[in-house]
Amino acid sequence: MLISLEVFYAYGNNLSGSIPICIGNLSNLNELSLHGNKITGSIPHEIGKLKLLRELHLGKLTLFIAYGNYFKGSIPQSMRNCTSLFRVDLQGNELTGKISEQFGVYQDLGYMDLSSNNFFGKLAGNWGQCPKLTVLSIYDNMVSGMLPPELGIATQLHILDLSYNILVGNIPKELGRLKSLYNLFLNNNKLSGKVPAEIGMLFSLELLDLTANQLSGPIPVRLEQCSKLRELYLGENIFSGIIPFQIANVCSLQNVDLSQNMLIGVLPPELGNFILLETLNLSHNKLSGALPSTFQQLISLTSVDVSYNELKGPLPNIKAFIEAPIDALEHNKGASYLQKKGKDHA
């Protein structure tokens, strides 16, 4: 009898078929890993009998890992009984069901990845009641509704990825409490309104991606307080006003995308402080004036796009501009841009 079995690793064995319901008889099981197989069908309700399960991996029982299989259907409601879970990885399946009804509150849960499935419905605020949660990834589903302010209670979060869903409404200011957050992905949703100033309180933040929403208002000046920020993606929104010079205080920035907004005015010379900057996309705005002479200092820059603005004057004599393709410079006002275009066609 295998009733004493505590750990069952069967990942990467090309297994097929479904999970047998007798799995629920392994009452001492605390780790179950079935990822990297070709298992199909639904997850049996009997999984909920595994009260000691800590890890569960069912992906591509503290531990539940099952990513990268072909699971369909909903998560058994009995999964709420697996109160010892600390890691769940179900990404890359075809699981469905209301996201708010699939899971309970897990005091030991540190990692939850439900990405690339078909979950729908509204996010519940109870994710904020998982005090040890460091990773919450639910990208590429059909989650709708507003971001629950209660997420701000999960102060141990390092990664929050809710991208590629149908989230609406404002970004709650309570997210500013997530002082341990490294990466925040809210891109490709339908979020609107102004970005709360409290985002500037995310002092550990290294990546902020708000691309492809309906966010408006000015670029928050308080982003200058995110001194560890390396990647800033605000493209494809409705941000307006000038680019605040204070953002240049974030000297750690390596990739910046402010494209496809409604930004106006001249580029602040302080942007030359971005000595680590590698990519810069300012295209499809209404920026005017000359490129600052301080752009000569952007020695790390390898890719630039300033097309579809109202810029004029000489181009900086640095590699990124010298080697830029025509379509990264065109549709501006300056003769220098036309000359560059002519040279490339010569």
Image: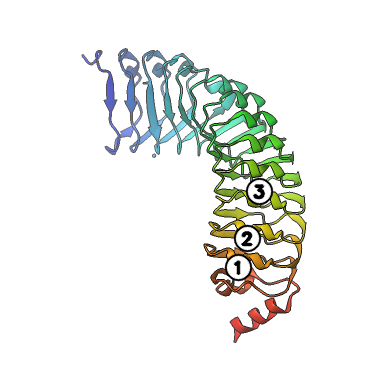
Q: Is residue 90 left or right of residue 194?
A: left
What residue lies at 50% left-to-right and 37% top-to-bottom?
Answer: 115
Tell me the SS state at disc 1.
helix
- Tag 2 near tag 1, CB within 8 Å: yes
Nearer-the-camera pick, 326 or 291? 291
Tell me which residue sits at (59%, 87%) in the image.
346
Helix, strand or loop for disc 2 = helix
Residue corresponding to mark 1: 296
Across and down, in percent, residue 268 comes to 71, 58
In the rendering, at what x and y percent does residue 302 appear? Answer: 53, 64
Q: How far, Cα to Cα, is label 2 from label 1?
A: 7 Å
Which residue reaches farthest left?
A: 1
Above or below, 42 relative to 12: above
- Judged from the image, the secondary structure of the residue bearing numbered disc 3 is loop
Which residue is at the far bottom? Answer: 346
Residue closer to the observer: 219 or 147: 219
Point out the tag, 2 or 3, that comes first from the N-terminus.
3
Judge the density around disc 1: few (<14), some (14-19), many (≥20) Cα neighbours within 10 Å: some
Mark identifier at residue 212: 3
Looking at the image, do the residues carrying marks 3 and 1 touch, with CB atoms under 8 Å apart? Answer: no
Q: Quadrant of the N terminus?
A: top left
Give the side of residue 308 with respect to residue 225, left or right: right
Q: Find residue 272 and name its label.
A: 2
Occupied quadrant, residue 343: bottom right
Give the image location of residue 110, x and y in percent: 45, 26
Residue type indicated by callout 2: Gly
